[in-house]
Image (cartoon, rainbow, N blue to C red):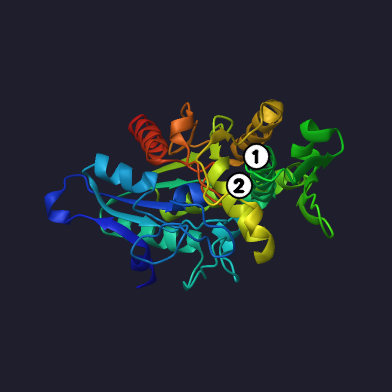
C-alpha cells in the first residue's frame, strides 16, 4: 500500500488509549533536510535520509518523529513531505524530482495520501492529526539564499583562504551588497594570477519573486486545509516559518569546499591544503531587516489562506537561536538542527494540546 511507504514510526494499537494517527505534508522543514557535511553539487551529498533512502527527507530527524516520541497516543506517524515541494506539489504531486533528485514514486499526491490515511484512521475509530509546512518553495527564496550563501563563502575565501594573495571578490548589485537580497544581482570572484589570464567565477543571485506568488500560496493553503478537514481530520496545524536571521554558516569549511569544486584542478593549488572551521552569520547584518520582512510576508500569505475553524490552527514559530540551525552548506543552513527540530516538536505539542 502506497501510504505505508511513508510510515516512519508506529505502535501497537492494543497498547494505546485514545489512539491517534499523525500525518505530515510540506517541504524540507517537515521532511527534514539534514546535511551533516559540506557536500556541494547535485543530489544533496552528505545529506541524511531515513530507511526510505531519499536524501533530504529524513522523517526520523523531523519534528514529526520527535512529537511521536512525546505523545504516547500516536499509533502511526506518516510523513509525506518532500524537500523542495511547494503548495502546488502538496496538492497535485510533482512529475519531476524533489530538491535532492528523488522521484515522488507514489500513486497519489502528498495531499491525496494524507487525506486517504486520515479517512482510513477515522473509519477505524482513531483520532487523526495533521501538521504541514509549505509556501516558501512557491517562490525562489531557496535559490536566493543558496546563491547568497555561495557568495558569503567566496567572500570569506578571498579574505582568509588566500595564502598567495591572488584571490579577489566584489559584490555586484543595484544598491550594492545591502540591496542584493530582494533586488538580485551577484558576486564576482577571481584569481589575479601573476602569469597568464586571470580566472573568473560569477555567481548570480535572482531577484526575489515572492510578491508575485503570495496569492497562489493563500489559495493553496485554503485548498489543503479544507481537503484535510473534508477527510475527517480532528486537528490540523500549519507550522509557520521561523526567523532565520540567527543562522550561522561555517564559511571556512564551505568556502574551501565550494571554491575547490569551482576551480580547475590546475588552480586548486592556490587553496590552503585544508579548511579551517569558521562560523559567520548566513544573513549579513545588512540584510537582517529585509530577510525578516520576507519571512513575515510569507507567513502572512499563509495565514490569509488558512480557514477559520475550531479544528485548525497556525503554529507561530518558537524563538530560534544560532544553535537551533545547521551550519552546513549547500542545503544545511538555515534548516533546523536537532535542538531546532525539538523546538518545533514542542511548538506542535503546545498547539495540539490547546485545541
Q: Secondary structure at mark 2?
A: helix
Q: Which mark is residue 156?
A: 1
Crowd class of label 2 (few under 14; some 14 to 19; many from 20; radius 10 Å)? many
Residue at (51, 54) in percent of width and height: 227
Q: Quadrant of residue 92?
A: bottom right
Residue at the disc numbered 2: 255
Q: Nearer the viewer, residue 284 or 94?
A: 284
Evaluate if marks 1 and 2 touch, with contact meaning CB atoms under 8 Å apart: yes
Q: Position of residue 200 (x, y in %)?
A: 79, 55
Residue at (63, 57) in percent of width and height: 269
Q: Secondary structure at mark 1?
A: helix
Q: Position of residue 266 (x, y in %)?
A: 68, 64
Spatial CA distance of label 1 from label 2 is 7 Å
First reached walking from the N terminus: tag 1 or tag 2: 1
Q: Is residue 235 left or right of residue 263?
A: left
Residue at (21, 43) in percent of width and height: 72
Amino acid at each position: 500500500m502506497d501510504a505505508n511507504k511513508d510510515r516512519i514510526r508506529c505502535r501497537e494499537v492494543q497498547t494505546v488509549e485514545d489512539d491517534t494517527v499523525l500525518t505530515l505534508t510540506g517541504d524540507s522543514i517537515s521532511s527534514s533536510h539534514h546535511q551533516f557535511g559540506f557536500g556541494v553539487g547535485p543530489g544533496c551529498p552528505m545529506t541524511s535520509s531515513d530507511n526510505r533512502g531519499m536524501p533530504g527527507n529524513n522523517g526520523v530527524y523531523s519534528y514529526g518523529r520527535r512529537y511521536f516520541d512525546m505523545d504516547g497516543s500516536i499509533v502511526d506517524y506518516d510523513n509525506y513531505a518532500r524537500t523542495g515541494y511547494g503548495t502546488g506539489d502538496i496538492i497535485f504531486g510533482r512529475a519531476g524530482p524533489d530538491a535532492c533528485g528523488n522521484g515522488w514514486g507514489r500513486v497519489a499526491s502528498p495531499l491525496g495520501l494524507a487525506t486517504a490515511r486520515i479517512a482510513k484512521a477515522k473509519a477505524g475509530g482513531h483520532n487523526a492529526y495533521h501538521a504541514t509546512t509549505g509556501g516558501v518553495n512557491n517562490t525562489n527564496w531557496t535559490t536566493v539564499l543558496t546563491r547568497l550563501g555561495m557568495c558569503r563563502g567566496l567572500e570569506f575565501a578571498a579574505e582568509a583562504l588566500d595564502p598567495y594573495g591572488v584571490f579577489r571578490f566584489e559584490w555586484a548589485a543595484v544598491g550594492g551588497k545591502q540591496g542584493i537580497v530582494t533586488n538580485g544581482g551577484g558576486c564576482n570572484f577571481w584569481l589575479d594570477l601573476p602569469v597568464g589570464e586571470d580566472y573568473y567565477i560569477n555567481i548570480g543571485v535572482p531577484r526575489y519573486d515572492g510578491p508575485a506568488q503570495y496569492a497562489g500560496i493563500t489559495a493553496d493553503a485554503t485548498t489543503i486545509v479544507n481537503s484535510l478537514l473534508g477527510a475527517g481530520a480532528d486537528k490540523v496545524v500549519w507550522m509557520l516559518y521561523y526567523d532565520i536571521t540567527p543562522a550561522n554558516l561555517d564559511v571556512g569549511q564551505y568556502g574551501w569546499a565550494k571554491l575547490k569544486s569551482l576551480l580547475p584542478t590546475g588552480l586548486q593549488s592556490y587553496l590552503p591544503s585544508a579548511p579551517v572551521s569558521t562560523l559567520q552569520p548566513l544573513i549579513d547584518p545588512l540584510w537582517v531587516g529585509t530577510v525578516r520582512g520576507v519571512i513575515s510576508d510569507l507567513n502572512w500569505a499563509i495565514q490569509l489562506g488558512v480557514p477559520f475553524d475550531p479544528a485548525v490552527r497556525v503554529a507561530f514559530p518558537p524563538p530560534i537561536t544560532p544553535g537551533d540551525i545547521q551550519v552546513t552548506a549547500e542545503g544545511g543552513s538555515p534548516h533546523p538542527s536537532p535542538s531546532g527540530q525539538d523546538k518545533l516538536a514542542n511548538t506542535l505539542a503546545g498547539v495540539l494540546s490547546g485545541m
